[in-house]
Amino acid sequence: MIGKYLLVINTGSTTTKCSIYLVNDNTQLELCSSETIEHPDNLFSRFPTISDQIDYREKLVKSFFTNSLPSGAVVLAAGALGGMLPPVPSGVIELNQELSDFSLNTPVYEHASNLGAPLAFRIASSMKALPFIADPVGVDEITSVSRISGVPELPRFSYVHALNIRSTVRQFSEEISIDFNEIRCVACHLGGGYSIAPFAGGKIIDSDNRMESAPFTPERAGGVPPIPLFEACFSGKYTKEDLYKKLYGAGGLYAYLGTKDVREVALRAEKGDTFAAFIFDAMIYQICKEIGSMASVLEFNLDGILLTGGVANSKYLTDEITRKCSNLAEVFVYPGGNENEAIASAMLRVLKNKEMPLKWPGCILSKRDVDPLHDFRDENGVFKAVPFAIRSGL
């Protein structure tokens, strides 16, 4: 069908998910074509760094779009999930060469999502379309008080599954007819990694930040006891890379059970594997504990608790969380999480002038914005007020 289209690119560690959406006469989205491009297991051995994969992935992505778009199609925009950026506000960021280069060459952390921006920029440029990213994990709207960690030199910061959380809250707000900016809920993205976050005033105002207090996940250790971790760091038994992998990639369910597949864990438990059942229940226990913690941020005044992400497909898990947490608020389940549709919807809001795109690098939050102690420092960075414990000699 000849018409106007939006293209979406979603880069994961072992896949690249591509989608084509038609913008119909009512300016609504219609999914026309989608493909998950599977990458071989030896991808990382073939390419020394993630950024080295860019040309390989671009060729595959361009082939899909070229073969799937009808002749004469007008591509309005191409978008992607943003990668590991510095702290930014929520919303859509218009891509430029500088942001593309930053994502590819100097991201905050290495991750396959960093390939999204340069791929979208290249595809959009070749098709004379507008390029965007939407709600990257660097979205940081947490409150000043939530940044206090207990060590002044190590303030808390935000890395969160902002795209799926904000998209799910939008859907929830429409279903219960409460304005998006007035919703108060705890939103839980449960995938390979977890983000459990209180949402209020249209913002993610805190989160468990993946490796702080987060529950363990199918592949991540979550929050671990710090003193044993320090001892492991200086024991001489492990390299930095060894420990990083234990925490991020080979932790969680995988460390205990040798699988990252929640479906397999649930099946083992159903067949009488008591150890698998015990570890599965421990993960659910930690999720519920973190939901309660984040509910306290909202003073236990909630419109709902939202469960989303691939792990939310587990009925046993969602039933248990509902049983344990329903005294706090009603639990709503949105299994999966269509990130590609969320990206397309975000771009459409910009094209319909319902949302203004952010500009790079102007949208990067300043150090002052993310310094919880800024208002307590003088022009030289010295605290203007002496803490009570020091004043009193305690």
Image (cartoon, rainbow, N blue to C red):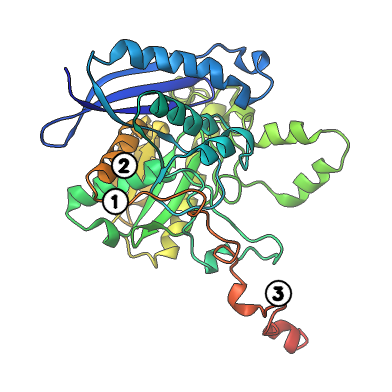
Q: In which quarter of the image is residue 382?
A: bottom right
According to the image, label 1 marks what residue? 355
| Label whose residue precedes the other's in the sequence (2 or 3) | 2
Rounded to the nearest angstrom, the CA distance separating label 1 from label 3 is 37 Å
Is 41 in front, or is 368? Answer: 368
**What amino acid does circle 3 point to?**
Gly
**What amino acid does circle 1 point to?**
Glu
Dot 2, how many residues are within 10 Å of its Cα: few (below 14), some (14-19), or many (20+)? many
Is 288 in front, or is 342? Answer: 342
| Label whose residue precedes the other's in the sequence (1 or 3) | 1
Mark 1 touches mark 3? (CB < 8 Å): no
Q: Which residue is the extreme one toward the left?
A: 25
| Label whose residue precedes the other's in the sequence (1 or 2) | 2
According to the image, label 3 marks what residue? 381
Q: Which mark is residue 346?
A: 2
Is 54 in front, or is 333? Answer: 54
Residue name at image x 45 percent, y 54 percent: 89
Secondary structure at badge 2 equals helix
